[in-house]
Amino acid sequence: MITSLQNVFDTARGFLNDVQVSGGAVWQNAKLQVHFNESYRALFNCLMGSGKRVQRVVYLNFPARTTVLNPANFNIPDLGEPEMVEERPAQAAINITSTSIATPISVLAPSHGFGTAGQIVPGQISGVAGSAAPWGNWFFTIVDANNFTLNGSMTDGVAGTGGIATIQSAARFTEVYPIDLTAQGLDGLPTQYLEQYLWIDETMQFRGCTNTQQLRITYWASGTPPTNPNLNINIDNCIDFLSVATAANAAYANAWPARGDELYAKAYGVSGDNCTGGLLGQFIKIQVATMQRGPQRRRLPFRDKRSRFGDAILG
């Protein structure tokens, strides 16, 4: 189950209806947000070593003769560290005006030129501000000269603005390799490909390229919590821990030690070991069990070839 920040707040309020306050406490989103930040970062710290639930993929067009990629300039607020960077020559990009809160998501890109009504074309969306839902690799269904929808998409309840849409390129992605020092390959004249990058000071640095390149970046997200209550958290099955831990933090801040102790133990376990006890420990165990689920199917050449009907091909 994917939950929203609003779901967490609503559930946390249920735990904060304390008898010390006549009629129950009144907790607003802005007040709970501070306490949610603490529980969200605790969840991220545990997830980083146990699963790919905090791994993201983005597509973006990196301008020619540019040497620094600052994620914030591309409306990527949570790029913690690149896992893999790939490149290919970019197709022409069309500016997006806005994205809808409908499902499937509708994209307004005036005079996009991607085709006529009813056509389906593959492409990528990137750079949309305010909503992560339209980002990614899609098939576009053309509605008219200015609008298209994203097949299979689901809104996160927020209308996005800006960004670009790019038609799928026929060229294959090739890897851009990480280096440790600038002197290992970032100085010199730009060529047709970026080829190497250096991750430093929360930015990606390149030698530069003579072309605009489309980058596909697979990255580990940072622990930066969402601030818009309508946004999906994008970590499924996490609402139990986040709501209880947020309520525990809020109870302590409101000088309710008994309720805070009770909720903290439920969230983290009696020992307070953040990754093994309570609801958080149960959540992390599920992540580990998912990774270990098997047995994994062997790939060629380490398994026998089989015919269409399942008979082993000998020799």
Image: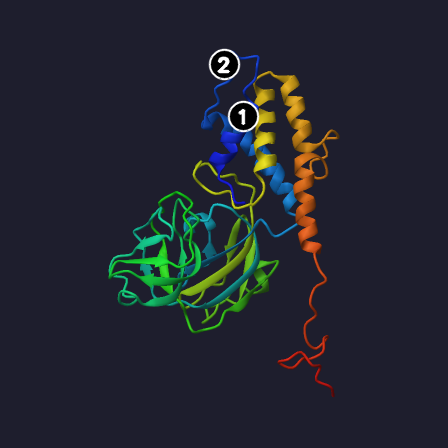
Q: Find residue 180 and report its horizontal and vertical position in percent.
A: 62, 58
Q: Find residue 229 and report its horizontal and vertical position in percent.
A: 44, 36
| Residue to which mark 1 is pinned | 14
Question: Does residue 3 sit above or below 258 in this rendering?
Answer: below
* Label 1, residues with CA under 10 Å away: few <14, some 14-19, many ≥20: some
Q: Find residue 276 and report its horizontal and vertical position in percent.
A: 72, 39
Residue 74: numbered disc:
none
Image side of residue 273 versus residue 155, left or right: right
Q: Quadrant of the N terminus?
A: top right
Q: Secondary structure at mark 1?
A: helix
| Residue to which mark 2 is pinned | 23
Q: Nearer the viewer, residue 267 or 79?
A: 267
For badge 2, the amino acid type reads Gly
Image side of residue 208 versus residue 276, left or right: left
Q: Quadrant of residue 269?
A: top right
Image side of residue 287 versus residue 114, left or right: right
For badge 1, the amino acid type reads Gly
Question: Does residue 23 sit above or below 44 in this rendering?
Answer: above
Q: Find residue 122 and report its horizontal and vertical position in percent.
A: 39, 66
Residue extending farthest bottom = 315
Of marks 2 and 1, which one's residue comes earlier in the chain?
1
Q: Nearer the viewer, residue 183 or 235?
A: 235
Q: Nearer the viewer, residue 199 or 33?
A: 33
Residue sitting at 70 percent across and 77 percent down? Answer: 301
Q: Quadrant of the C terminus?
A: bottom right
Image side of residue 249 versus residue 299, left or right: left
